[in-house]
Image (cartoon, helix red, strand yellow):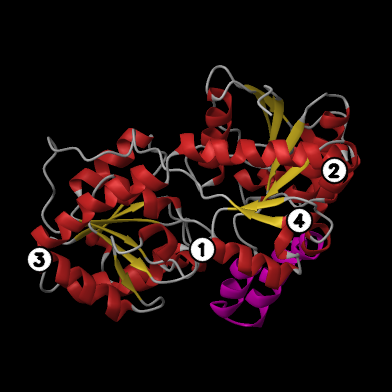
């Protein structure tokens, strides 16, 4: 089967710079379009950056999480004309501390899809009731990067006090919907064998319904830059603000221990801090304000430049469904320290310094080892780039998705 298809990719939010969802939607839509398929992206705000040949269909949610200020949220809600039931639900649920975007996006996307004609729909992990309705009418592939039960577990583990635990429980209340929906889905794709195992365990999904297709890495953008000199004692990491799952605390503690021996030590954090949040408070407590540089809203080229300036990349995550920063650092041929958890060893194989999670000691020792043996570690990093090019190429991966799409369409017709 090699017919060219009309494909819809759904994504409840697709920030082009923050997190991996916008990156994934951009790359997958581009790769399928390059195979000759017509691809539309249906997205809630924030909207993705897409290739010019790909149509963006906006699903106008309220985007209440663009701010955490009540007055600003109220203004957004009041200025919305012709409010729907989903708008009311979104506002009230967010007001009570929930995260309603998954559910309301699914409802809005279902309405859009009911008025359209697509050969197949790919939903980027909303796991919403609306997608079950979509599945009744057209072939559907659900992408689950990893079960959000893992995020919930670590958020609860690192919560301080009963009130904060209640707040986290309220935020993750959408998990009940995701668990109910996932067991009704006929076709699921996930980017790692570890995620497949965890989805089956945490969501009760049959493993036969889950295909493993890794994510690709844009090795044409994330490249070594020989003309850029590395800044002495500069290291780099990527971390969403105040997300325990990313393990940034342990890297910050390691920096605090290292600064006496490496007074010029700088940690570049790709991301933005939450003003007054946990991470900012920890940096002040450790007295490492002068050792930390935040860089946010960067293009791929600008991120590659930051890697080129740095001597070591660190991924201190407690869990990763796939982990774009792992592959991007390797693609830039920078020595990498990464935690030996979840899917990360599947990506790195032997081309990174793998360490236990939740260990500032291990991060500190690994940094010292690489600073002491730069040439040996650079040789491994150069080999790591070739590993990424050979195994995480979006052209190859698009063909795997295409095969799964054709199979899903055939089975839907039966």
Mark found first going from the N terminus, 3 or 1: 1
- Expressed as whole percent of the image width and height from the top left, the position of residue 316 reads 38, 67
Nearest to the eye among marks 2 and 1: give it.
2
Nearest to the eye among marks 3 and 1: give it.
3
Q: Most extreme residue toward the top, as rendered?
A: 53
Asked whether disc 2 touches disc 1, contact meaning CB atoms under 8 Å apart, the reply is no
Q: What residue is pinned by disc 2?
A: 135
**Magenta region includes residue 177:** yes
Mark found first going from the N terminus, 2 or 3: 2
Of helix, strand and loop, which one carries label 4? helix
Q: What residue is pinned by disc 1?
A: 243
The label on residue 95 is 4
Of helix, strand and loop, which one carries label 1? loop
Separation (CA) of disc 2 from disc 3:
54 Å
Image quarter (top left, top right, bottom left or bottom right) of the N terminus: top right
Asked whether disc 1 touches disc 4, contact meaning CB atoms under 8 Å apart, the reply is no
Left or right of 347? Residue 314 is left
Residue at x 74% of width, y 32% of height = 59
Left or right of 194? Residue 129 is right
Asked whether disc 3 touches disc 1, contact meaning CB atoms under 8 Å apart, the reply is no
What's drawn in magenta, residue-wise?
Answer: 149-178
Q: What residue is pinned by disc 3?
A: 373
Separation (CA) of disc 4 from disc 3:
52 Å
Is disc 1 surrounded by few (<14), some (14 to 19) or many (20+) residues within 10 Å?
A: some
């Amino acid at each position: 089967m090699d017919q060219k298809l009309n494909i819809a990719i759904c994504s409840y939010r697709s920030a082009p710079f923050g997190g991996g969802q916008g990156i994934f939607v951009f790359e997958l839509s581009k790769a399928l379009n390059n195979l000759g398929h017509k691809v539309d992206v249906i997205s809630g705000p924030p909207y993705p950056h897409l290739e010019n040949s790909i149509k963006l269909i906006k699903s106008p949610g309220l985007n209440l999480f663009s701010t955490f200020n009540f007055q600003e949220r109220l203004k957004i809600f009041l200025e919305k004309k012709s409010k729907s039931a989903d708008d009311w639900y979104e506002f009230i649920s967010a007001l009570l501390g929930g995260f309603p975007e998954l559910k309301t996006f699914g409802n809005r996307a279902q309405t859009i899809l009911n008025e359209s004609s697509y050969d197949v729909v790919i939903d980027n992990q909303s796991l919403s009731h609306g997608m079950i309705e979509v599945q009744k009418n057209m072939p559907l592939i659900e992408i689950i990067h990893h079960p959000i039960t893992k995020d919930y577990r670590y958020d609860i583990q690192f919560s301080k006090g009963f009130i904060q635990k209640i707040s986290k429980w309220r935020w993750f209340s959408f998990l009940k919907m995701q668990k109910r929906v996932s067991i009704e889905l006929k076709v699921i794709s996930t980017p790692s064998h570890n995620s497949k195992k965890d989805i089956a365990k945490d969501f009760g999904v049959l493993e036969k319904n889950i295909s493993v297709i890794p994510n690709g890495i844009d090795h044409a953008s994330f490249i070594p830059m020989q003309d850029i000199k590395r800044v002495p004692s500069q290291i780099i990491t990527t971390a969403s603000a105040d997300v325990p799952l990313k393990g940034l605390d342990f890297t910050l503690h390691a920096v605090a221990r290292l600064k006496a021996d490496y007074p010029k030590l700088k940690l570049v954090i790709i991301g933005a801090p939450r003003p007054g949040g946990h991470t900012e408070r920890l940096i002040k407590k450790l007295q490492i304000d002068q050792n930390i540089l935040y860089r946010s809203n960067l293009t791929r080229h600008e991120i590659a430049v930051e890697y080129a300036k740095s001597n070591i990349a660190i991924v201190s995550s407690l869990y990763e469904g796939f982990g774009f920063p792992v592959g991007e650092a390797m693609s830039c041929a920078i020595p990498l320290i990464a935690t030996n958890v979840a899917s990360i060893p599947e990506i790195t194989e032997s081309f990174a310094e793998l360490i236990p999670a939740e260990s500032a000691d291990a991060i500190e020792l690994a940094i010292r080892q690489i600073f002491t043996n730069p040439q040996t570690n650079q040789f491994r990093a150069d080999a790591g780039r070739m590993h990424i090019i050979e195994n995480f190429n979006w052209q190859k991966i698009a063909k795997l998705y295409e095969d799964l799409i054709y199979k899903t369409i055939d089975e839907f017709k039966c």
